[in-house]
Image (cartoon, grey):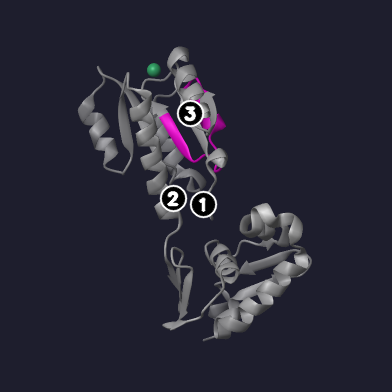
């Protein structure tokens, strides 16, 4: 799932917690902090409200219908949500060893009651970690993309891409074979400036990008009437 960095007000947190007081206090606090928050009061509702746009889950272990462990397992079993950070919320009486075992996967847990400051620190740290994994270095078919430096190497040579060209290629290559409409690319890459750029702007940047890409440009397909995609499967037919 391709994700560029989000503004704070775009970050969505799902709280799964059956104790209404805790759920409401936590929701209110996180909303005050600027996050978008939704609450589920049992395990089935949590799964129902789970979707790929959610950036973090605060998951009570003891939940009606399905417990937190099962909710976690089901979230992890779906490709589109498998990487979402999950912070377990546990009461002091619950089995610490079992929780610790689950934490090996990189998740976090908090023992209730915890202060909102501690909660916020853990939420921020989990979001930071997941952001780091989102902007991973990509290496395939001879190209290497370093998102932190906006640098692209092709067969070891720096392509000297502009910021916009880099964002275009990173967006496409990060989601192989997914077709991006010009509108989607505009929203992802230009977001706030969207009124000043047009479909033609996308095409112009794409042409300049292709000129710099050399033999790699064969993988960037124009999908007529729709937009663009990175098709890594072309290599099976034409370059061998
Ligand atoms: Ca509970």
Q: From where the camera sits, is residue 65 visible?
A: no
Can you say whether 65 is above or below 69 in the image?
above
- Counting residues from the N terminus, which is met first, the one under dot 3 or under dot 1? 1
Mark 2 burial class by Cα count in 10 Å: few <14, some 14-19, many 20+? some
Helix, strand or loop for disc 3:
helix
Of residues 140 and 24, which is closer to you in this image?
24
Q: Quadrant of residue 221?
A: bottom right
The 10 Å Cα crowd at callout 1, few under 14, some 14 to 19, many 20 or more, is few
Q: CA distance from mark 3 to mark 1?
A: 19 Å
As drawn, the residue found furthest toward the right would be 225
Nearest the viewer among 41 and 187 is 187
Read off the residue under disc 1. 5
Number of other residues with Cα within 10 Å of mark 3, as a class: few under 14, some 14 to 19, many 20 or more: some
Residue at image position (65%, 79%) is 208
Q: x, y percentage for residue 36?
A: 55, 33
State yes or no: Cβ of the residue under disc 2 lies below 8 Å from any atom of ligand 1: no
Residue at (44% x, 37% y) in the render: 74
Question: Marks 1 and 2, Cα distance to the nearest angstrom?
Answer: 7 Å
Q: Is 105 drawn above or below residue 167 in the view shown?
A: above
Q: Which residue is mark 3?
A: 30
Q: Which corner quadrant of the image does residue 229 belong to?
A: bottom right
Q: What residue does disc 2 label? A: 131
Highlighted range, magenta:
40-58
Return the x and y of residue 99 as percentages of the image width and height.
Answer: 27, 31
Q: Is residue 51 magenta?
A: yes
| Image position of 30 (left or right of 211) | left
Can see residue 14?
A: yes
| SS under mark 2 | helix
Dot 1: what SS? loop
Ligand 1, by image quadrant, is: top left
Q: Is mark 3 within 8 Å of ligand 1?
A: no
Marks 2 and 3 sit apart, C-alpha to C-alpha, by 19 Å
């Amino acid at each position: 799932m391709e994700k560029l960095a989000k503004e704070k007000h775009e970050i969505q947190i799902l709280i799964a917690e059956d104790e209404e007081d805790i759920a409401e206090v936590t929701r209110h606090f996180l909303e005050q902090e600027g996050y978008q928050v939704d609450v589920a009061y049992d395990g089935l509702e949590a799964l129902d409200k789970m979707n790929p746009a959610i950036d973090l889950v605060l998951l009570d272990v003891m939940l009606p219908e399905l417990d937190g462990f099962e909710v976690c397992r089901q979230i992890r079993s779906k490709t589109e949500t498998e990487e979402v950070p999950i912070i377990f919320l546990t009461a002091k009486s619950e089995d610490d060893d079992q929780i610790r075992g689950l934490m090996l996967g990189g998740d976090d847990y908090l023992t209730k009651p915890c202060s909102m400051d501690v909660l916020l620190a853990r939420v921020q740290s989990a979001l930071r970690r997941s952001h780091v994994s989102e902007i991973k270095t990509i290496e395939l078919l001879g190209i290497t993309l370093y998102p932190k430096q906006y640098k692209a190497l092709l067969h070891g040579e720096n392509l000297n891409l502009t910021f916009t060209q880099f964002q275009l290629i990173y967006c496409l290559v990060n989601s192989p074979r997914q077709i991006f409409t010009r509108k989607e690319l505009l929203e992802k890459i230009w977001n706030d400036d969207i009124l000043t750029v047009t479909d033609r702007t996308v095409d112009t940047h794409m042409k300049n990008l292709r000129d710099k890409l050399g033999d790699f440009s064969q993988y960037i397909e124009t999908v007529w009437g729709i937009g663009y995609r990175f098709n890594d499967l072309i290599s099976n037919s034409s370059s061998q």
